[in-house]
Amino acid sequence: MNKIIRVEIHEFTHTANNLGLLTNANTIGAVGFAKGQSIKLDKYAIVIETKDGCRGEYVTHWGGNQVACAQSKMLAPKLLEYNADEREKIYDDFKRELRQFDHMGHGPLDIALWDWTGKKLNCSIGVLLGSYRKRLPAYASTYHGDRNGGLDSKEAFSEFAQQCFELGYKAFKIHGWHEGDRKEEADNVLHVAKEVGDKMNLMLDPACQLRTFADALYVGKACDEANFFWLEDPYRDSGVSAFSHKRLREMLKTPILQTEHIRGIETKCDFLIAGGTDFLRSDPEYDMGITGAMKISHLGEAFGIDVEVHACGPAHRHVMAATRNSNYYEVALVGPDCPNTMAPVYKCGYTDMIDCIDNEGYVSVPNGIGLGVKYDWDFIKSNTTNLSVYE
């Protein structure tokens, strides 16, 4: 009865206002404030159905691009070989299947399988994972700096940080400008710390836009002076060189957060043992699902270090709720007078917009069955550009 008999992948688009592309690359990382403009964003939804009619569902957040979708479509027909409760076997086989690729299409399928399991057993994923907390402290994670009147100066960043503090946030992460000017980045770090550093934990993520190791060291020294909580993916190694980040760690006191850009428990373990990071990164969309993300949580626990969950979404909340060694939930991305890029696909009130926190700076973990959210399938289907069905 648990045999998978049908898999659907709905590719759809939605529009977000006051946002545009800050660079010529049509990627989520290039999106930023653009007053009066709008941008169409790609996402996809997955349905996995078994012989008894039980359905597992997931709509992508950050990982919903065309590259990831192509990999999901590559794997989807193979799901018909399995029972839906064989998550570990599927994880192992799909990891091998995508060995020549970046694994980005694996995670959304695994998340849908977890949703199926929760529905089958009439309980939440949080219960299945043995989670011990129902509220998660959150940080505001900004869009990249722009030149359009949004986050266009160090004063604008500090003013926005103050707005986030007044909403209830106790932590704030800066994504700087795409130009990667080390002096501009360092000045921003010091200014924001001067304005709000006494009441918020601050983080910096240049998203690998600093051009050289020397630039990373220069900006890292500013983070030291400003007592930043972490420095993340600073420069153009693209976040994959354990050796260079080990050297950076030796020269800075600010903790380094790496491994967003490498996939799976084995490579993250290698990076950690090589001394390249103080914190690990995990993401159920990026790291082969909830199954993969929980392996990373336990890897960090075994080494006595913290694992910070990248980005946001209902799956991310369940993973963090079951991860003792994790500090903050990332409400990403936010900025003044513009929305998060999440699709408006929830009929249950779930949101990751900037105001999703309570007045103490926490988000709640969904407590319904499966992922604990209800999707607006009318919206998804009315905006679908391509439907792939495997049965």
Image (spheres, grey):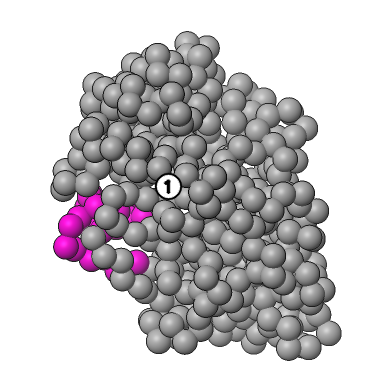
**Is residue 158 toward the left or the right of residue 290 in the image?**
left
Who's the residue at 37% across and 50% down the image? 334
Vertical placement of residue 24 versus 232, above or below:
below
Count of numbered badges drawn on the protein = 1
Residue 258 picture location, percent across and down: 53, 33
Q: Which residues are magenta?
A: 19-41
Q: Quadrant of the C terminus?
A: bottom right
Residue found at x 74% / y 66%: 124
Query: SS at mark 1?
Result: helix
Q: Quadrant of the N terminus?
A: bottom right
The verdict on residue 198 being magenta is no
Q: Give how far across and how far down residue 11 sits, in percent.
A: 44, 76
- Residue toward you, 373 or 359: 359
Check disc 1 and report the residue beneath it: 167
Along the viewing direction, whichever of 374 and 24 lies nearer the viewer:
374
Residue at the image position 50 percent from the left and 14 percent from the top:
253
- Whether residue 164 sits left or right of residue 74 in the image: it is left
Asked if residue 369 can be seen in this view, the reply is: yes
Indicate whether 127 appears above or below 349. above
Name the image quarter holding residue 128.
bottom right
Circle 1: residue type: Leu
Q: Which residue extends farthest top? A: 251
Q: Nearer the viewer, residue 255 or 276?
A: 255
Q: Is residue 257 above or below residue 101?
A: above
Image location of residue 175, percent across then percent down: 35, 39
Q: Main secondary structure of the magenta part?
A: strand
Query: Residue 336 location, x and y as percent?
Result: 28, 50
Badge 1: residue crowd in 10 Å (few <14, some 14–19, many ≥20)? some
Give the residue displayed 58% in from the left and 43% down from the top. 137
